[in-house]
Amino acid sequence: MFDNLPPTSKPFMDWPWERINPHFQELIARPIDPQNVADWLADWTRLSDLINERYTLLNVAVTQDTEDEAAEARYNDFLDNIFPGVKAAEQELKEKLLASELEPAGFEVPLKKMRTEAEIFRKENIPLLTEERKLASEYNRLIGAQTIDWQGEERTLQQMRTVFQTPDRELRQRAWRAMAERQLEDRQAINQLWEKFMRVRGKLYQNAGLESYRAYRWKQMLRLDYTPQDSQQFDHAIREVVVPAATRVYERHRQKQGVERMRPWDLDLDLYPLDLPALASYGSVENLKSTAETIFRRVDPTLGDYFHTMRSENLLDLENRKGKAPGGYCTAFPVAKRPFIFMNAVGLPGDVRTILHESGHAFHNFERFDLPYTQQRFPGLEFSEVASMSMELLSAPYLSTQQGGFYSPEEANRARLSHLEHILIFWPYMAVVDAFQHWVYEYHALASEPSNCDAKWLELWEQYIPGVDWSDLGTQAMTGWHRKQHIHRAPLYYVEYGLAQLGAVQVWRNAMQDQQQAIKRYRHALSLGGTASLPELFQAAGAKLAFDAETLGQAVELIEGKIEELETSTRPS
């Protein structure tokens, strides 16, 4: 039967469930033993890869153009008619493998994950999970449609970011207020979506017999190596040791800009201080691609080859355009064994950081696809972000044109300094998002009312980000949770970025001592996929999974020391 599976996903895109299901049923019925389990896993992997690649292609299509009704119809058809059967059948396969008590080589950690998935699986949750994905697509559509008329031209909010590079503060303020006004037009619609999200998530955890959605989601995300309390400890550590450092960053920029108070229009994307005068643009998107490839070859020739493959095979969709979903991501096509990068480039230095970041994910995909079985390839989101954030830091020495990069030597130092400042500022923002979500799912009924979410977000914002003045902008400040897509589309997924950033700083520290050895350990850790535990993956990369103020404080000290060094080198003599 498995001989008729196509070698690529293209002919598989139109297979109905009636044609797919017999393959699952054969796997479910086939006896397994130590002699044939490898073949059984290989067949399961072939089928799973085809289904996952089909879903990924459909999902990419609806993010590339949120206004494409035909693409949305194909995506929803998959969710309605393929996804439920796949979820149920794959659960039977997991239960079959667990019941066999077989443990194939490299399956210790994957089996632990399967046991967790089996523990929370309920058939009645399948349609709820489908509904949740549709709501996420609806959120994308709302955000992707947000444009404003600016100086007689329709512009996406992402394209408006270029205005914030001007030293004209009055112009920046007008742009910021125009964008905020447009975002608030969708306030009611997003609130209504939120209420639907919360109803669905309430049913999910109740059906699973758990005490909260947080408990359900923790298991769903396969967080086996740390607890919600660890996550909250990390948030408290950030407040203790990073918020003061981030406030120092804001104060330096307040003085540089010569303003009495740092206001939202003195920042980029409501968070990072503007670095005026602006760094030079990288030019065209093609130049962004070619220069990034040069940098990756300097980091490691194999990584450069990986990126060249992505360029030559059209696996990069980088330009911003109307109707394109917000943000950036890297996904993967498991049949083709290729990653795909999506982002919204508009010509800003932030786009350089984004391509370096997403390429770290891409390299992770290239490395982990050497593992034979799909069940071994998922490392957990926390370490996936170590792959991407480490690549930002490992690439930093090659940003100068003297190394084939984007900037003059002086600008490259400024870019590196800005990146390190962004890390310090990011941690408190991450803690706001994470602490907010802990509150949401600890107080599910209370948080189902959007006005209560507004109040909580504002409370946390004032605690963690005291260096920016939002006075007389209460409505815009309290609705910041509307604009953080993870809160809506990927609940409780954000602490990963903070933990991974701490891991990445440790990888960077190693690279400053021995770049070649640090890269070797980095790539080895990526190649392990999901065959090792999260602490073991961090250790393999030369880092430690940590939540405490002492480890975080050491990272802050290292960063601030490097900032001072770079500040000195960029000051006029």
Image: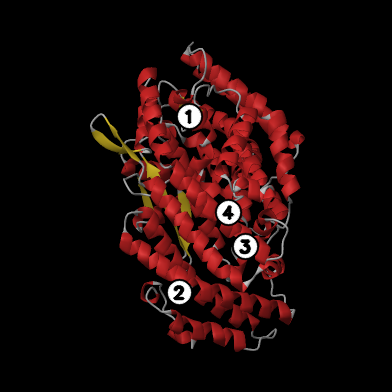
Question: Mark 4: which amino acid?
Answer: Met
What amino acid is labelled 2 in the image?
Answer: Asn
Mark 4 lies on residue? 198
Against 542, residue 528 (above or below) is below
Residue 429 image point, x, y percent: 59, 35
First in sequence: mark 3 vs mark 4: 4
Q: Where is residue 218 in the image (x, y as percent from the top left)?
A: 67, 56
Q: How many numbered markers are drawn?
A: 4
In the structure shown, which secondary structural element does the residue marked by tag 4 occupy? helix
Would you name the residue on which mark 2 appears?
A: 81
Question: What residue appears at the point 60 percent right and 53 percent down from the top-left corner?
Answer: 381
Separation (CA) of disc 3 from disc 4: 10 Å
x and y, in percent, of residue 462 in the image = 61, 28
Task: State the separation of the CA atoms marked 4 and 2.
Answer: 24 Å
Residue linked to disc 1? 415
**Residue contact between numbered discs 3 and 4, judged by CB atoms under 8 Å:** no
Of the numbered discs 1 and 3, the one sitting upstream in the chain is 3
Of callouts 2 and 3, the N-terminal one? 2
- Say which residue label 3 marks: 204
